[in-house]
Image (tube, rainbow, N blue to C red):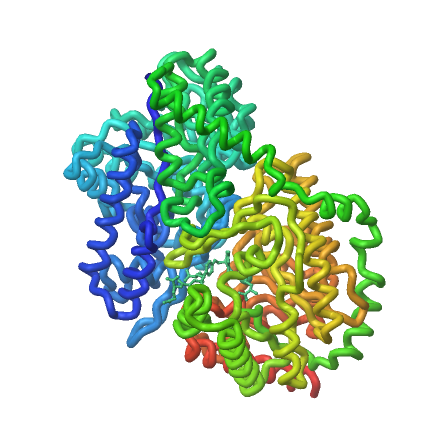
Amino acid sequence: MAKSSILGFPRIGAQRELKKATEGYWSGKVTAESLLETAKTIRAENWKTQKDAGVDIIPSNDFSFYDQVLDHSIMFNVIPARYTKFDLNDLDLLFAMGRGLQREGVDVTALEMVKWFDSNYHYVRPTFGKNVEFKLNSTKPVDEYLEAKAQGVETRPVIIGPVTYLYLGKADKDNLGTEPISYLPKLLPVYAELLKKLLEAGVTDIQMDEPCLVLDLPENVQAAFKDAYSALAQSGLNLHLTTYFGDIRPNLKAVTDLPIAGIHIDCVRVPEQIDEVAKALTDSQTLSVGVVDGRNIWKTDFSKAIKTLKTAEAIVGDRLVVATSSSLLHTPVTLESEKNLKEEIRDWFSFAVEKATEIVVIAKAFSGDSSSEIADALAANAKSIEARSTSSITKNPAVRERLAKVTDADKSRKSPFPERLVAQKKNLNLPLFPTTTIGSFPQTKEIRVQRNKFTKGQITAEEYEKFIEKEIDEVVKFQEEVGLDVLVHGEPERNDMVQYFGERLDGFVFTTNGWVQSYGSRYVRPPIIVGDVSRPAPMTVKESKYAQSITKKAMKGMLTGPITCLRWSFPRDDIPLKDQSYQLGAALRDEVNDLEAAGIYVIQVDEPAIREGLPLRAGAEREDYVKYAVESFRLATSGVQDSTQIHSHFCYSDLDPNHIKALDADVVSIEFSKKDDPKYIQEFAEYPNHIGLGLFDIHSPRVPPQSEFEARIAEILKVYPAEKFWVNPDCGLKTRQWEEVRQQLTNMVNAAKVFREKYSS
Ligand SMILES: CN1c2c(nc(N)[nH]c2=O)NC[C@@H]1CNc1ccc(C(=O)N[C@@H](CCC(=O)N[C@@H](CCC(=O)N[C@@H](CCC(=O)O)C(=O)O)C(=O)O)C(=O)O)cc1
Ligand SMILES: N[C@@H](CCS)C(=O)O
Ligand SMILES: [Zn+2]
């Protein structure tokens, strides 16, 4: 009988218990003991769910208070000295590294946060200081294994493998030039010590996550696998090398003949890799085949999954494990809470809890279980799959006709940037070093409560609208007081920058409780694309027009771009991503044009997910993506006059300046405050249009003093011409408190004024 395996389970709790407890702890309303208790309850619930579903291989150490990569940094003592000097307790140290800390006597910024491969999850980048001393600081994986065991659940601990851990890291600013992979010999003894403790606790098998194997790896990193796993095999534990999100074939040589118990591959993404990987295994190694999607919410097509498994079985026989493609961290917890979805559509979905059952049914069916229970499950599944593929909900001929008529001219502005700039200067009359923000202002408790009341029908649309107008009034007044140049309306009406649009576009459905962790205590409810996308009516014009009506300053309209809408939703898997992207581009074009017609002459189309969408390896697929991503953005933004200024914004990813340049936005703002290696300042030096490099970290409550802003601007101006440079934060301010924002923006604007004076005299 093939075993069923789950690689990781969402850790936020079915009702976001972890968020509430963590944020309560930060605000002093929840004790450390209570936070630890909440975490324990979530873990217990997760293990029970998986055990009750009949899953054979259940993970532990997939829980984290903030981020699993950060947990490993703390466990291995990869803690820059700036965090250790305050003698913080374990939880506060973790949170200080994750989000920074500023309180009496303590002032420390957060570590850099970056996208986890091509997902909307962010990890805290391991940062290796000059004096890093690797040692085993915690026994979290052992503790959580024993905790599950005490509950009667045998688990397989999940640990990030040493090569991926180092490869995802960076040298700290006092250590520039050091390649993290060079620390492997020093790190391996700490892994060995951890594995020894796990063995002593009764562990037999470990899930060693090495997702870096799906990337294009340099030779020295490929070579590191042999050193690492030869050493770790001494532990006597069965090590299961686990990859996901892509194709490991180009790196297969690096893992062939390693002393490991087996390999896991993602066959939802790349089923074609089965043959080659299976053939590269030794006679005793297992092949774990990911057939239940850890990154999307569509019900698994059982017959297709079984077919995939059969291909593998032909080569590896009974050494086969039936698994989720990746951790289920990227899916919502349970469909159980979704009461508002149309039954016909709800039947197409499967969230983490439902996927636990799917994996068991597939493993049983594949292994020949002919019970009526399995036969019924297979029949019901076939019916759902068939119903979706034939449903009229998924198709809109008008959308397809419109897209077929799009021309190259539709994807190009009327004039080149220098000519547009002349028209925009005349139209907008902005000073040197224009100051602006990225769009959102604090989403206060009051805003969320009012929206919640409106959603539940406890206040009328007029009352909610009045409330939003009052919020806009305050945001506009605030920006005028602080002295910003290009204002925003603050996005108070938006629950989220993607969900908000999903709720207003045809072709989407959305959940009421489908939360997924994005970083730390911040979660999203990705809308779901079920059909062809179009815009039935304007989505943002009313709020932007109102905001412009109450100020003489330029008001920036604020939209989320096609790629970001696509990437931060659960996309369809029945038509190519490319088609969905163009559909979104066309829908957003209508909105951009309507904003301009309503008197909004600065329009920002955010594309923070543009890098995230880039296929993980170089090649034809990547080139195709760059083409359609750029074209979709240009389709959305090219309908306006030269005098209308198009902005775009990007954050938390390693951008390719050429891709950004190809979008041909008039002004781009890029998250930048944590890029402390001077090489990054050079990265966009050749950017031909105007640019703002983010000047403060919006994830941190910390207020940088004006002098810090001035020092950073001076550094940037050594590379960028003054007339090109905009002054702005890293990203939107929705997660901050008002008082923090007031101080942060005041210092930022005052610093800009210092330079404005300097350069005009
Ligand atoms: C900019 N980023 C975004 C990403 N992805 C997105 N989809 N959106 C983004 O903005 N990726 C990269 C970056 C960083 N990531 C994030 C992700 C999430 C947040 C964030 O602030 N999330 C909020 C939730 C936002 C939301 O949907 N709010 C709703 C519901 C609020 C709520 O909880 N209501 C309560 C009732 C009211 C109450 O009593 O408080 C309830 O339902 O129980 C809304 O406002 O209506 C979060 O809090 O996690 C930021 C950056
Ligand atoms: N306009 C959005 C961009 C976030 S990436 C905001 O300000 O929150
Ligand atoms: Zn951003």
Q: Quadrant of residue 202?
A: top left
Q: Which residue is at a point 28% across and 39% down the rendered structure image?
A: 49
Across and down, in percent, residue 701 comes to: 40, 71
| Nearer to us in this view, 649 or 754 | 649
Image spot of residue 498 (x, y percent): 55, 57
Please indicate whether residue 544 sits to the left or right of residue 522 in the image. right
Task: Kindly identify the residue that appears in the image at 41 percent across and 21 percent down.
Answer: 287
Residue 436 sits in which quadrant? Answer: bottom right
Judge by depth and name the residue closer to the eye, 379 or 37.
379
Q: Position of residue 40 (x, y in %)?
A: 22, 49
- Residue 182 x/y as whole percent: 43, 41
Decide: is 218 above or below 521: above
Q: Nearer the viewer, residue 538 or 234?
A: 538
Quadrant in the rendering for residue 361 = top left
Residue 308, above or below 46: above
Q: Name which residue lies at 35% across and 29% down.
A: 5
